[in-house]
Image (cartoon, rainbow, N blue to C red):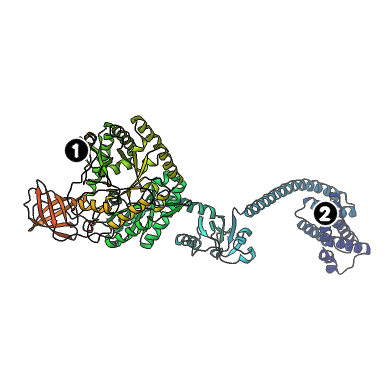
Amino acid sequence: MIAVATFPIAITGVVPPLDVLMALMVSVALASSIRWVHDRILGGSEKLRAAGVALVVVVPMYLFGMGITRWAISGGIPWDAALAALLTVGCLASAYLRRHPGVIFASQLALWLSAVLTTASVPAMFALAVAAIQAILVSREQLSEQRMLEEQLQARERMQTRARDILADYEETRQGWFWETDRRSQLTYISAPAAKTLGSTPDKLIGSPLAGLFDLAHTGQEGERTLMFHLSVRSAFQELPVRAAVDGEERWWSVSGRPVYDDFDNFVGFRGSGTDLTEKKRSQEHASRLAHYDSLTGLANRFQMSQTLEKILTARQDHHRACSVMLLDLDRFKQVNDTMGHPAGDALLKQVAQRLKRSVGKMGQVGRLGGDEFEVILPGRVKRTALVDLAQDIIHSLSQPYSIDGQRVIIGASVGIAISPEDGSTSDELIRNVDLALYAAKDGGRGRYHFYAEDLHAEAEEKAQLEQDLRDAVVHRQFELYYQPFVSMQSETICGFEALLRWFHPEKGWIPPSRFVAIAEESGLIDEIGEWALRTACQDLARWPEDVRVAVNVSARQFANPQLPSVVSSAIRRAGVDPGRVELEITESVFLSDDEGTDAMFAALKRVGVRLALDDFGTGYSSLGYLKKAPFDKIKIDQSFVRGATEADSRNGAIIASITSLAHSLGMDTTAEGVETLDELDLVRMHGCSHVQGFIYERPIRAEDATQRLLTGLTAVAQGPRSTRAPRQTMLRKVVLDHQGTFYNGTIRNISLTGAQIEGLWNVPVGTIFQLHVSDGVVVTATARWSEEDRLGVEFAAPLKHDQSGRISAVQGRAPQPVAASGGAR
């Protein structure tokens, strides 16, 4: 405005009159203070704002218009210059006040009104009035539009403010965070919570690479490749899991982002968000662990072990498919679980898992399939001797005493072993075969290992059928009790009989107890069978003399039954016999749990009045501790100590002497079982056994025969050979016999160190010499000593040997492959 006001002076060189000059100077002064006044009245009342507008806009414009007009009237400047000055100032004012239509109208009105009033021109006044009316209408429209724009602007600002507040709250809750980069993938924005998590501030992170926020080296190749790929090709990505670059803590983020372009379609960077993925990832890892690992022991579960085995057996190269599988089953674990409770059983399983992992080490993977069943997978080709060493180490380790809730617990383990591809090339086949090997190990007496052999399939089918037949036998009462007397060494008279269970199958004939008692215990049938045997024995006892007792075997499962004292009392009461004439024979396995329930059961049975005998002493986990508190009346020395006791360098005699001396000190009787020769009888008598039971006096007889025997008197006379032959082991083992290049298939029925009974060859001449293939790589020279129909007895040219566990080592390996046609060349 100063330049416009001085413009006429510069053109004409004429100085205006004093009043005009004063009006122009005041106008310029007031207009120059518009910024200062604006800052002071901003935010004030409407009256204050109106006064400010009048002072710095309306009055200066009015004075300027009046001054220029009066200057032109006085002839100081031409009218065209005056009009140009008025138009120029009006345009400048409109441009400067463009956002305020009302103020523009007031400034223009003041400018031209002063000019019209100064000239006093009626036409000018009329034109000004028309222009004012039009200006009012236009101003109203502009005011309306401006008001609408202001409302929209305010609404947009409120929305932006609300959005900023929401985003700030969202960031502060640490549920998520935001980031932005430039075209070089360097940060231009990052949320404060994310920066704090990284141990930094947004200001320090601005300008650093986006990838520097993440620990891509530990994120995984897939996450690293995906993130860097998207950043390089400028493509959007969603919820990429990345590990945050946080020291000392494993924190995971889920990152999303999209490329940003300007109005000219130029790439300007990325913008995106992130959320904390740590808890979700931990939950996923926990769920994955539950799906692949046993929650109790921490070992791999059945699913994981199955996947591992399947992966090995389906390897692309044949030599990578070799592996060995061991299946383990804990012996007597169920008894611990039943007597001490499930928490104690769980604690025991944890300790078993720890010992098993220590034994296997880095050789393979250990898993728990469920219950008390464990599995070991050994990848690669492992020597058979190494498998034997590992199996023995596992059995030894798991058989050591455990401490559960302050109580001493002893269990055992049986191990089945199968090798791929020899014993199966598929997972199902290998597991089925190793399962058969485990059953064979358990059938062999538990605490053993057994390799899979083809003949185990037939044995498994036979066992399953035998269990079904046993159930039928319980229903149809096919059992019978036989009685074997035990004789006093002092008076050589019969003191009583041991009741022995016998089973006559309607089709298969007599089935020995060694084949069906274990099945009865596993199937739970032993409870019903044992109660029947007890009641029957008491009824037979009622017909015998008063000084004769009867001994009945009680299994560990029966002993754990709280109803046993009631069952015993009921059987005695119904038979009407003196409780002191009934003797219950209990094995050492009842002490495995070593808890208060065992002591309570002993006390309850003694209250009934029966005698208690410790059966098969020395064959289990013998402990002198329970002999101090268990109220036994007798200790029965197992026949395994009597067998071979008369042989040179045998220690069995010393063991028998120790047992009898211990029993005498504790006021207990002793019974030596399985005495069959006069030499054995002399030995047990010499070592102080109070009673003897065995074939040397009598074989087991029926109840009727026992009654008739007692009618002849109680005197017992020893009758039998002076010495005995080598002990034999019963089995069903496929073998191949080679006679001068001709091969025959056969089956060993029983075997000792010096000979065997073989089935499958008819009418073999006595003296025939065979090369007997007992196992792979084990060939024994044998001579036929007798033959009857399809059976023959052979004598080995050199005695076989026992292994460290007392088993015949020659029959521990894989059975030989049968010949295609018996009697042909191999």
Amino acid tagged 1: Gly
Q: Where is residue 694 in the image (x, y as percent from the top left)?
A: 24, 46
Quarter of the image for the N terminus: give it: bottom right
Res. 54 visible in picture: yes
Q: Where is residue 579 in the image (x, y as percent from the top left)?
A: 36, 36
Of residues 585 and 563, the one nearer the viewer is: 585
**Above or below, comparing residue 546 to residue 42 in the picture:** above
Residue 278, image quadrant: bottom right
| Neighbours of disc 1 within 10 Å: few (<14), some (14-19), many (20+) | few
Q: Which of marks 1 and 2 is in front?
A: 1
Dot 2, crowdedness within 10 Å: few (<14), some or many (≥20)? many
Q: Which amino acid does label 2 sit on?
A: Ser
Relative height, residue 221 to residue 515 (above, below): below
For the residue labelled by badge 2, is the local secondary structure a helix, a strand or a loop? helix
Tell me how far mark 1 sits from mark 2, CA to CA: 132 Å
Mark with earlier residue (1, 2): 2
Disc number at residue 107? 2
Q: Compared with residue 356, is residue 521 higher up or lower down, i.e. above or below?
A: above
* Mark 1, residue position: 509
Q: Where is residue 682 in the image (x, y as percent from the top left)?
A: 23, 52
Query: Which of the pair 90/52 is nearer the observer?
Result: 52
Vertical placement of 708 versus 793: above or below? Answer: above
Disc 1 on helix, strand or loop?
A: strand
Is any part of residue 306 visible from this angle? no
Disc tally is 2
